[in-house]
Amino acid sequence: MSLTLYVDAARFRANQHRVLALAPEVVPVAKGNGYGLGNARLATEAASLGVDTLAVGTYAELGEVSEHFPGSLLVLTPWRSFEAPQAPNPRVIHTVGRLEDLQGLLGRDPEARFVLERMTSMLRHGFSARGLREAGEWLDANPAGTFEGVAFHLPMTGASHLSEVQRLMTDAVAAGLPATTIWVSHLTDAELASLGRSWPDYTIRPRIGTSLWLGDRDAFTVKASVLDSHEVDRGDIFGYRGRSAPKSGTILIVSGGTAHGIGLEAPTGANTMKARASAIARGGMDAAGFVRSPYSIGGKQRLFAEPPHMQASMLFVPAGSPVPAVGEEIDVRVRYTATSFDRVEIG
């Protein structure tokens, strides 16, 4: 019995080819939990697309994908002497965002491949405009390695990023850097097309994860197995914490718990009144001991009977509602990037 992700292969791959048609220079991203599908599986999918480069989030993820993807491997997390592997790897393209790291990388591996990341309004990693010029000057005086281009990691939301990208492109030109490849994240199809028209001498390489792998959400279905079922009357005691049933109904034991990411929620921006109101409502339910679960039965989202266990969850189904039999599967709504599945079935 397991928490299972079912994938419609035809729709899943049709979406990949749609993205590839719009952005032929795409660099697929496989990081974290592999968007719920696993990094090794995504590496295999990327190889079947015929792309030449795959991006991973960290150096630790290289081992998951290197045997499944034959091309270049771009590491998105900037190089640091205390994080990067000691052994040189000609397939790896490093990301560098500080002059001291550029010097450290090329001191360790004079033939290293690298991109220089320009700081964006994200304020996460990267060179300032002045720092990028200093890196260009240092490379002129100390030629080494293979410079693969400049990287921009942009915010995911907000207005068009084109005006910011135009400024960043100007900084890259002013730095006197020789490469004509720009690696970008989080631009729309329209923004990518506009950028390409504005800078025809540059190759624009969009690094894409979510829209490539999860762009067609109807291609995915998540199901949990019903493991056990127990009728209860009002006041009956159940669960780890000795809670009492609020009324007659059924305690349903289903697969999926905290080890899968069930019941764990990453913070959101909550940048709208509706989102904030929803958060307040959820908090009120939690305080009262009634927390809506991601599990649905008969099209209705059911409540957790108590907080999820490590590998299973307890749901409360009130009397008079349909109760699935042991062995049946019920629908689960999850955030794919925060969920670990027992099985992924593509067919």
Image (cartoon, grey):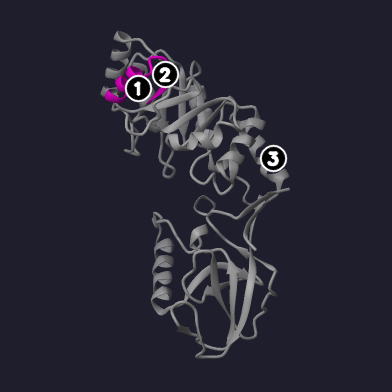
Query: How many other residues sit within 10 Å of disc 3, few (<14), some (14-19) or many (≥20)?
Result: few
Mark 2 or mark 3, earlier in chain: 3
- State the image coordinates of residue 73 (x, y, percent, origin top left): 51, 28
Q: Do the residues bearing badges 2 and 1 touch, measured as CB atoms within 8 Å?
A: yes
Q: Which residue is mark 1?
A: 105
Mark 2 or mark 1, earlier in chain: 1
Q: Do the residues bearing badges 2 and 3 touch, measured as CB atoms within 8 Å?
A: no
SS type, badge 3: helix
Q: Measure the C-alpha gap from mark 3 to mark 1.
A: 40 Å
Q: Measure the C-alpha gap from mark 2 to mark 1.
A: 7 Å
Residue 124 is a magenta residue = no
- State the image coordinates of residue 273 (x, y, percent, origin top left): 40, 62
Q: Which residue is mark 2?
A: 112
Q: Is residue 98 above or below residue 275?
A: above
Query: How many other residues sit within 10 Å of disc 2, few (<14), some (14-19) or many (≥20)?
Result: many
Q: Measure the C-alpha gap from mark 2 to mark 3.
A: 36 Å
* Magenta region, residue range: 100-116
- State the image coordinates of residue 176 (x, y, percent, origin top left): 34, 13
- Residue 166 seen in render: no
- Disc nearest the viewer among 3 and 1: 1
SS type, badge 2: loop
Q: Nearer the viewer, residue 186 or 4?
A: 4
**Amino acid type at image mark 1:** Leu
Question: Which numbered circle lies on residue 282?
Answer: none
Q: Residue furthest front?
A: 87
Q: Which residue is mark 3?
A: 14
